Image (cartoon, grey):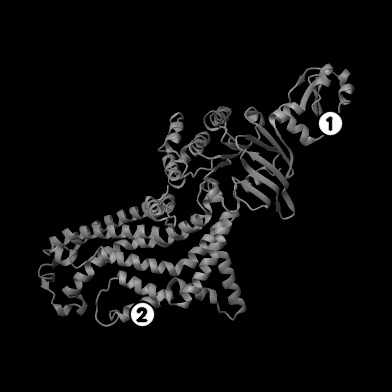
Amino acid sequence: MTTVIEARNVGKAYGKFRALQNVSFDIPLGRIVGLIGANGAGKTTLLNAILGLTRYDGELKVMGQNPSKNRAKLMEDVCFISDVATLPRWMKVSEVFDYVESVHPKFNRAIALDYMSRTTVPLDKKVRKLSKGMITQTHLAVIMAIDAKLLVLDEPTLGLDIIFRKGFYASLLEEYYDQNRTILVTTHQVEEIEHILTDAMFIREGELVLNETMDDLSERFCQVFVDESKADKARAFNPISEQKAFGKINFIFNGGIKSKLKGLGEVRRVGLADLFVAIMTGGKK
Amino acid sequence: MSNPVAQTLERIKGFKVPNIGKIPALLKREFLDSKTGFLTVPLVVAGFTLFAMILGLISLEIQFGDKIDLDLRNFEVTVDGETLTDSDFDDDMGKENFVQILGRAVSGATSAGIIMILPFVVFFGLLSSLYDDRRDRSFLFWKSMPVSDTKEVLTKLGYYAIVGPMILFGLMMVLGFFAMVVVTPFIWYHGGSALDLLWIPTPFISMWIGAAANFIVYGLWLLPILAWLMLASAYAPKAPMIFAIVPVGAIITVEVLFNNGQTYLAVALLDRIALDYAHIMGDIFEKGGHFHGDFEIRDLSIGDAFRALGASITNAKFWVGQLFTGAFLAGAIYLRRYKI
């Protein structure tokens, strides 16, 4: 299996503040990986290192290249959207396509125009005249028309309404993603991307605290809503989190012990957002 | 998009051609970004200039038409019925000289407005060249394209030092042409032949090409200053102009305060901007036997540009400046690469 990103002890310090430390992982081709962390946890720093936008310590290989040294070459196989609405505001939409067509060897204008034809974005308007949602659609058209191996998305839908957000991820999944592409995405709207992820990575204070496939996660973690009378029984199985809700207590368990928990109540899959909160707050509440 | 000529050469001989394929696209992007300064504003200025010129000529005719009679066929001026003779004029103002001056004065004077725009457009354009896209975050889009930071920075410099000014020189040539068109009926009205007096004696294309070529050489002298502006633009967290000017002002102030009022930096800047190049051009004019003596118009030629280039690259001060250019550009490229 081809490895798209190989990280070994990647670190980054700003003065005394360590934004990233000892981050190691491999991401193979054909995955959709969610990088999830609180504000300031180091998500963007890690993505910037992967994209060659910042210097770092340790070893990092993206598509076999050193991103810090070969960003230009790397960008033939890697696309990214960092932040919302980064398209140059003084350009017309058609000029954006002209530019990408003239500098990117793997850009197919017909694909971009096909996607645009299904939106209401006017090609002859300047980007500054477009709504935030339209700018994102234009950027998505650029991305989808580039035959890249890795797509990195850093909060690509921040500030957009729910319809645009849903449409964005639906387009990515239906028209872009296949077994020969990897998508690495961060967002605060974890619930919205959960169903498309194949893998999840949790990052806390610059350290990677979890890196697993979604299948393994739903195997390992589960939640049970338990009546107060059975709470002590539940606590005996060492839950990683407990929270009162609707007169019951919601326990989250780690360690593939679903079968043992059946007598306590209905055993359910844990949502990624709940799991994230449980692991990050790291204790009983 | 790769260059088809380069592709063919590679196929035939296994020949490696330096990849300039993306540079035209990058230059086009700079042009689109700076269109207001290099096209819209100069066009507006040109329009006003022509309009003012037409208005001026007409009002002169109305005001002095019945007092002064200008006969351009016999080259005579009659004021209140009295014809002026040659002795009434300075020697320099005979017909021979008049025809040399007329076209150049008309196109030169009308272009003055455009040439005055140039330093401002280049100065502010370079200051924002590596700053504006950081401020509005669009540099993240540029960086998602397979274009190296070195190529980005060097293309921007090339655009503001050469390509942009050449656009303005092109506009000046066109404006000069229209200015001559405007003067043509005025000459006819006074009985003269516009062909003999204006169009034949004025090499209106070659003189602008010559001036443009010489401007490029002058631009090479300015490179350290242009590169400094780019460094400030790449570094500034805000207000790049302050970061470009304050350090220079501070060094000059410290020099003046602690060095008995002497300042090397201010002198070096003045030499750079004007005096060194002026010396070179002075030498060229003297060797050409023109600058002194008889009144004669001397257009700048492409030959002069090559002579100025030769004199520049054999000048030690020129190269000392280019060391600074290199250092400032290296700094700008480094910041462009790693500053988020």
Q: Quadrant of residue A156?
A: top right
Q: Is residue B43 left or right of residue B68?
A: right
Label 1 vs label 2: CA separation? 87 Å
The spot of residue B75 in percent (x, y) is 12, 71
Residue at 56%, 35% in the rendered image: A180
Residue farthest to the bottom, as pictured: B293
- Disc 1 element: loop
Using the image, tell me which numbered label, if any, was put on residue B283: 2
Looking at this view, is B321 or B201 the one in front?
B321
Q: Can you give x and y, in whole percent of width and height, for residue B16 in the image?
A: 44, 57
Judge whether B284 appears above or below B34 on screen. below
Q: In the rendered image of this protein, does residue B240 appear above or below residue B307? A: above
Q: Using the rendered image of the protein, determine whether residue B55 is visible from the camera's viewpoint.
A: yes
Instruction: Using the image, tell me which numbered label, if any, was put on residue A284.
Output: 1
Above or below: residue A189 compared with residue B90: above
Q: Is residue A116 shown left or right of residue A85?
A: left
Which one is in front, B183 or A205? Answer: A205
| Secondary structure category for the residue under label 2 | helix
The answer to whether residue B18 is left or right of residue B81 is right
Q: Which residue lies at the image location 71% right of the left edge and 52% below the top edge?
A: A13
Labels in figure, total: 2
Give residue A44's quadrant in the image: top right
| Quarter the N terminus of chain A occupies | top right
Give the x, y percent position of residue B59: 22, 59
Percent position of residue B281, x then y: 36, 76
User: Which chain letter goes with mark 1?
Assistant: A
Labels 1 and 2 positioned on one and the same chain: no
Residue type at the position of mark 2: Asp
